Amino acid sequence: MAVSTTPTEPTSNPSRWERITAALDERLGLSALRYPVPRHANTLAWTLGGLTLASLLLLIATGILLAQFYTPTPEAARESVLHIETELTLGSFLRGIHIWAAQAMFVLAFAHLARVLITGSYKRPREANWLVGLGLLAMTYLLLFTGSTLRWDQEAFEAVEHNTGLAGLAGGLGTWFTAEFGAGTPLVTRLYLAHVSFLPAIVFGLLVIHFAWVRYHGISARPDVPVGEPDPDDTVPFTSHARHLVGWSLILLAILMGLAATTVNPVGSAPVPGIEVTKPLWPFFWVYQIENWMGIRGLFWAPIVVFVALAALPFLDRGRERRPRRRRWVIASALVLFGAWSVLTIMVAVSSPVAHLG
Amino acid sequence: MQVLNVPGVGTVARRTAVVLAVLGLVMTLVAVPALAHGEEADADPTDLVEQALAILVNTPEATGEALERVEAALAAETEQPSGALDVEALEAAAAALQAGELHDAEDALIEALGRDAHADEPKEPAGEQPAATTAPTTVAETPEPPPPAEPAEEPEHDDAETAAPAHGLTSRVEGGLTAPGPAETVALAVAVLLAVGGTVLIRGKE
């Protein structure tokens, strides 16, 4: 049975609470949030995108606090992180939430992508939103990368050296990543600016489009509903979905706080050029292993190939069928891709760092 | 292939396979073999010692590479003394590395650079955390290098990216599990409340 999504009709003798909510609604339009969404939107699988946003909001909040104590210069960056980690009251906890939330955002974004892929939610008319989602995933990677370089320790320095190599392969597109661009402004300062200004700005721009199109097309139906047919599922007001999302977000926050309170996140030794003795953050392990095999060009091409393949998906899988069992080649390809990613990640996790740059 | 025989998607799947194969071929053609481990140890002796130190700190299992650099620095310093390194300490570092005494080697390398390995006590985390919370946090210190006597000229960009840190070369925080201090315990209690609140919201009536 569909739940009413229209504002409650005023009763003849409203209570004080009803009068307050009616007054607020008249001014703030809160009842507009009671638009209908399918009941399955309240499952965890259909909440993963919202949880990714919750992680981002948490990252912004903790990032603003951390920025008060961070100095984005080569001389002082690592020292300021050491200060946050070892001297600032609850600094280690705060930094811990930021770092764990970043990894949570990465995992949740991929889980959301997997849900969309498995349920065929990228199909007509949502192809463009799939591409926007991939853009958000790319931005997540860039935010992770820039964030991991801000410690300006040996690992960060080596990561930047790799990306300077990548910049060379990218030609003019990679100019920003070279030390020559903006000479006088150190690279770590520019990475910090990217991390806190234009990358988040791009993310918010894409998010606005992403959510606007979700609102326009509606939350996708369950996969047993073919493309173009109406969703037979019951509806609930969006406020119910929002309440579930807030509930899951609180649980996510609790998990992150638990992790931050019981773990210490490392800060490496001061950067020394001419050696490669560290490995990157685990989300980059897969490209690191490809670089082990193919050199810096592998590091350049592998992400491009994966993103192009993912971007092509809605234009290759154009049938009306959305059930995973009827889309075997898509599911098989996704499993192969995920399997390869897992194997590469594990290979790097259990191996020693390898030098790639001459 | 079975997966390519699904009605209606066979052509698309074959097209995908062709596209992926072409992309794979392009990747293979443009790829170059990964470079060999490490780079030629022909740098400045001081750089070599700093590299050896960084190798010891970050990959203690790679003592061979650290030893190579120490020996190269010793050879260079013996051949053309620069006075920038303490040769005696460097020899002690080489001996310690050969004996597998990594901590002694680290100390000797710091001394070879003209710094005092024992000048600072290890740093403790902030707040009122008990000693237990510091267990995984090891911060070995080298002292702050002396400030320049007069304002230095604008450094080369590469130098600016690796300017000498005030906390010293090897100061670091090791990651891992830790016992929560009082403040973190309060945070854990709050986390439990948040989790309960979240569960109530999820399981509440429509």
Image: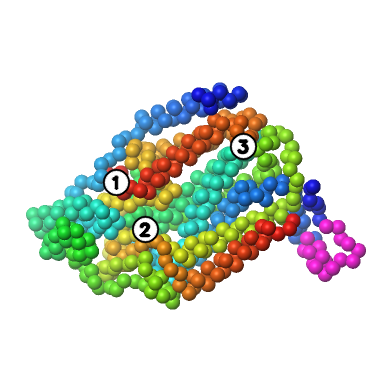
Q: Which of A191 and A246 is in front in this view?
A: A246
Q: In which quarter of the image is the C terminus of chain A?
A: top left
Q: Is mark 1 on a helix, strand or loop?
A: loop
Tell whether position A227 is magenta: no
Q: What stretch is highlighted in magenta?
A: A8-25
Amino acid of disc 2? Trp
Q: Name the residue under label 3.
A: A120
Q: Do labels 2 and 3 share a chain?
A: yes
Q: Mark 1 points at which residue?
A: A355
Q: In which quarter of the image is residue B109?
A: bottom left
* CA separation in Å, label 2 and label 3: 42 Å
Q: Which chain carries label 2?
A: A
Q: Do labels 1 and 3 share a chain?
A: yes
Amino acid of disc 3? Gly
Can you give x and y, in whole percent of width and height, for residue A120 in the image?
61, 37
Q: In which quarter of the image is residue B106?
A: bottom left
Amino acid of disc 1? Ala
Residue at horizontal 18 percent and vertical 49 percent from the top = B42
Q: Mark 2 points at which residue?
A: A152
Q: Mark 1 lies on which chain?
A: A
Q: Which color mode does the image show? A: rainbow
Q: Which of B2 and A270 is in front in this view?
A: B2
